[in-house]
Amino acid sequence: MATEKGWRRLVPHSLLGRMLLLTLLVVLLAQGLSSVIWLSQLRATQMEGLVTSARSLAHSMAASVSYFRSLPVAYRPLVLDQLRSMGGTRFVVTLNDKPLEMDVLGPTPRKTAVLNAVDDVLRQHLGSEPNISVSFVRPEDLRIFNGGIKLDELPRSWAHYALSLEPINPPVLVTQIELAPGEWLYIASLLPEPYTTLEEQDLPAQQVWFIVLTSSFLLLFIGLLVHWQSRPLKRLARAAREMSLGTVVEPVVEGGGSEVVEVSRAFNAMRERISRYLSERSQLFSAISHDLRTPITRLRLRVELLDDEAVQAKFSRDLDELELLVKGALQCVKDTDIHENIEPVDLNQVLHCLVEPYLSPAGNGRVTQQGKAAAFYPGKPLALKRCIGNLIDNALKYGQKAHLHVDDDAEAFVLHVDDEGPGVPEQRQEQVFEPHFRLAGKQQQGYGLGLGIARNIAHSHGGEVSLQNLREGGLRVTLRLPRTHD
C-alpha cells in the first residue's frame, strides 16, 4: 500500500505533466524498440560480412599452403625471407618444426563463426588429413618462431606493422597447418577492415544522441501544444471554482480545440441557468415570506376574538408551529445563500470572536482551543463565521462543552469541535444534516438546521463537515476547508 502511494506521488497531477510523461514513455519505447531492431539487423549484416571476409581469407591461406607444398623444401625459406622483406602486408608466414603454444582468446559468437568458417574452407581444399589449428591471440601474447619470440621483439619494419593497428590492436588470427612431419606452416593474419574488432557492438553514440535530440524536440513541441490547449481549461476550472463559491462570474471565453469550445459553451449555458434559478429562488422565498406573514398575523387577530379559550389555545399552537416552519425555511435559505465576495479571511480572528464570550477568567470556560490558523483563508467572511459558530453552538447545546483543535497546513484548514455529549449513532450521522431533524427531545429550542447550514457553507467553499464518535465519549465534528483545488 505504501509503495502504491509512493508511485502515485511520482505521477504528475497536471494534464501537461501527464501528457509529457506519457509522451516520454512512448518515445523511449518506440526508439528503444526501433534501436533494438536496427542493432540486431546491423549485427546480422556485420556477422554475414565477417564470415564472408573470413572465408575469403581462408581461401588465400589454402592457396598459400598449396603454393608452399609445390615448392622444393630448400626454396621455402627463401620465399619466406622475400615475403618478410616486402612488408606492407597484413600477415606473417613462418615455417616451424612444431605448433607454437600461446594463450588463446575465449570464445565469442563472432570468434566462433570466424574460426568455423576458416576451418571449413581449409578442410574443403586441403582435406581432412593434415592437422589444422585455428585460434585468436592477443598481439602481446603472439609468438612467431620456434624459440617463442614475441611480436614486439621482431623488427618493426615488417612483423610489427603487419600485425598491429594502433591504437585498436585487434586480435590476431593464427593458423597452423602441418605440411609434413616436423614441418608446420604458421600464418598470422588480421581480418580486413571494418571487421578488425570481433566484439559485439553496442548502440553507437550517434544513435543515442539522435534519440535524445528527437525525444527532446518532441517533448518540447508537445509541451507547447498541450500548454496552449490547456489554457482554456484552466480558465474554465477557475470560473467553475469561483462560481461554486458564489462569486459573480463572467461568461468564459470560448477557445481552444472543438471539444474545449463545446465544454466552454455548455458551461456558459449552465452558468446562465444557475444564475436564473438562484434569482428566481430568491424572489420566490421573498414572496413567500411576504405573503405568509400577512395571513398569519390576520389569523392571530381573529383567534384572539374567539370566546372558547380551549379552541383559542389550539389555534395559537398551530399558528406557532406554522410560523416556526416558515421562519426555519427562510433562515435556511438566508444562511446558505450568502451573497458575499471572496476575500482573505483571518480565521484566527473569527475563532477568537466566537470563543471569547465563553472564556472565563480562570481559564476553565465551556470552550477551549488548541492550535491556530497558519494563514488567511480565501472565502466568505460572514458565511465562515456562521458555519463555525453553528458547530460551536451545536456542541454547547448537546454536549455542554466545546473543545476546538485546529490543524492547518498548505493543503487544508481543519477544525475539530469535540463535545462531551452522548454522541450520535452511526446510522443517524447523515440524518442529522437534514433540515428539522434532531435527536434531542423537543425541550431543546431551535430548528434543527445548524449542522445542515454548516455543511452547505463548507460545500460552497469546496470543503466538508463530518461526524465521528470519540472513544472516551462525546462527538467530534470536523470542518475541512481545502487550501488547494485540483
Image: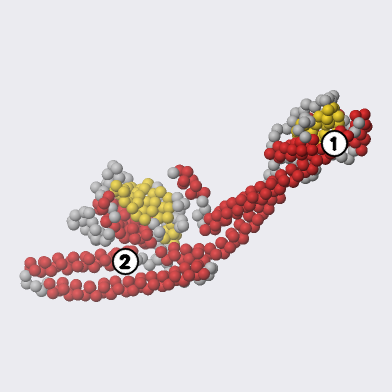
**Of the numbered discs in the image, which one, if any, rests on residue 334?**
2
Which residue shows up at 38% across the image and 70% down it? 274
Q: What's under tag 1, amino acid-wise?
A: Ser
What colouring style does the render use?
A: secondary structure
Residue 303 drawn above or below residue 141: below
- Contact, CB < 8 Å: mark 2 with mark 1? no
Q: Is residue 159 left or right of residue 337?
A: right
Which residue shows up at 68% across the image and 39% down it? 109
Mark 1 nearby-residue class (10 Å; few <14, some 14–19, many ≥20): some
Q: What's under tag 2, amino acid-wise?
A: Lys
**Of the numbered discs in the image, which one, if any, rests on residue 66?**
1
Secondary structure of residue under mark 1: helix
Q: Is residue 353 left or right of residue 203?
A: left
Mark 2 nearby-residue class (10 Å; few <14, some 14–19, many ≥20): some
Q: Does label 2 or label 1 sit earlier along the sequence?
A: 1
Secondary structure of residue under mark 2: helix
